[in-house]
Image: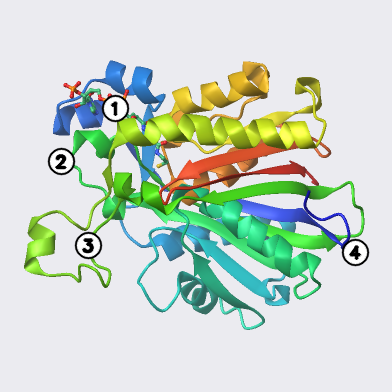
Amino acid sequence: MYNKNGKYNTKVTAFGKFVPETIYDNAYFESIVDTKDEWIVTRTGIKERRILENGATSDLAVGAIKDMVRRFDVDLNTIDLIIVATVTPDMFFPSTACVIMDKLNIKSAWGFDISAACSAFIFAVATARSFIESGASKKVLVIGADKMSAITDYTDRNTCILFGDAGTAMLFEPTEDKEDGFLDQILFCDGSGGKYLYMLGGGSLNPATHETVDKKMHFIYQDGKAVFKVAVIGMADVAEELMKRNNLKPEDVAFLVPHQANLRIVDATRERMGIDNSKVMVNIDKYGNTTAATIPLCMIDYYDEGKLKKGDNLILASFGAGYTWGGIYMKWSI
Ligand code: COA
């Protein structure tokens, strides 16, 4: 079990979100690829996604940070570490963390980006906890942001209907209350899953050439069926294990906060946990899969709707490219 001996726990003290205004609904996809609204809704649960027409992932993050400042009056120059969870950094380098600091004139922090695809928010929070609970950092800002439209092939019906763009910001600080904030976590990687979900081009393996562009190697490739099979098992396993080893019964869980890739995967996780539909955070219908942003965006949406309350027990669970997967057991602190 994580974190039984340290002085501090980690809790959420502020948050913000940003979703672009442009909407691509299922009717739009019916007009550009061979698909049907009914297929998309029944196979995935998605009805529409937000698309950032101008700008980059750092702009989604900056929008979310500005929203956080509006809500919580945070002095950005008291933040000492910024961790950006993203698979669509503005550039390979400098890091998106550096770009964001420059755009917001943040001088007090250091930072870096984390690449763990759809599990990146959970991996970034686990990293933030290590810095806070070791005493190395006092205020860590985790950004979960992805401009998936930048790496989506809008002629490939297998993938283009799935993804959208969004940015989130969450601030983490230490608490001496050992019953508050983040209480447990499970994290996994299995590189043998890499061949089922990837973007081949642009890295040192396949540097950009005319050929990599012609072969569409700068877009997401996914073997949906292969990923589906393992995602169903991986997400349900971590959620069930977190409940078991923390002695949580279904009635003790306020919400499952699942990565939003496919409503059928979410439902399989819910079933294994033995919880009711009303205890599952879902917003995939509005945004599609926004990769690093889905889990924090769910929490913020539910808070805004008055459904998420201080003291609620949450089980976060994700599965993504790598393969990467994991879960977090936490108490909501605001
Ligand atoms: N519209 C209509 N038909 C489509 C389609 C679309 N947008 N996309 C694919 N199809 C077709 C396929 O071509 C296939 O046709 P075929 O049987 O003639 O070959 C058929 O639908 C079924 O394809 P299949 O891959 O079996 O569908 P599925 O039920 O597995 O659903 C996904 C596809 C992508 C929605 C689903 O596999 C999935 O969600 N996978 C996991 C995603 C995930 O968790 N990723 C990790 C985090 S990103």
Mark 3 → mark 4, Cα distance in angstroms: 45 Å
* N-terminal label among 4 and 2: 4
Residue farthest front in this picture: 192
Give the Cα distance between marks 4 and 2.
53 Å
Give the residue at mark 4. 7
Q: Badge 1: how crowded within 10 Å, few (<14), some, or many (20+)?
A: many
Residue 26 is tagged as 1
Vertical comparison of 325 with 251: above or below: below
Please give the label number shown on residue 155.
2
Instruction: State which mark lies toward you, 3 or 2.
Output: 3
In this figure, which residue is indicated by the disc labeled 3?
Answer: 201
Q: Is residue 310 left or right of residue 16?
A: right
Select label 1 or label 3 by which is in front: 3
273 to 118, vertically: above or below: above
Q: Amino acid at mark 4?
A: Lys
For badge 2, the amino acid type reads: Thr
The residues tagged by marks 1 and 4 sit, at their Cα atoms, a distance apart of 50 Å
How far, Cα to Cα, is label 1 from label 3?
28 Å
Left-right relation of 97 to 178: left
Say whether disc 3 or disc 4 marks the residue closer to the N-terminus. Answer: 4
N-terminal of the two: label 3 or label 2?
2
Q: Residue at x 11, y 70 (%)?
A: 209
State which tag comes first along the sequence, 1 or 2. 1
Amino acid at dot 3? Gly
Mark 4 residue element = loop
Mark 2 is surrounded, within 10 Å at the Cα level, by few (under 14), some (14 to 19) or many (20 or more) other residues, namely few
Per the model, the C-alpha gap separating discs 1 and 2 is 14 Å
Q: Residue drawn at (58%, 56%), measured in percent from left and top?
A: 123
Mark 4 within 8 Å of ligand 1, using the beta carbon: no
In the image: residue 8, left or right of residue 221: right
Q: Nearer the viewer, residue 227 or 141?
A: 227
Above or below 75: residue 332: above
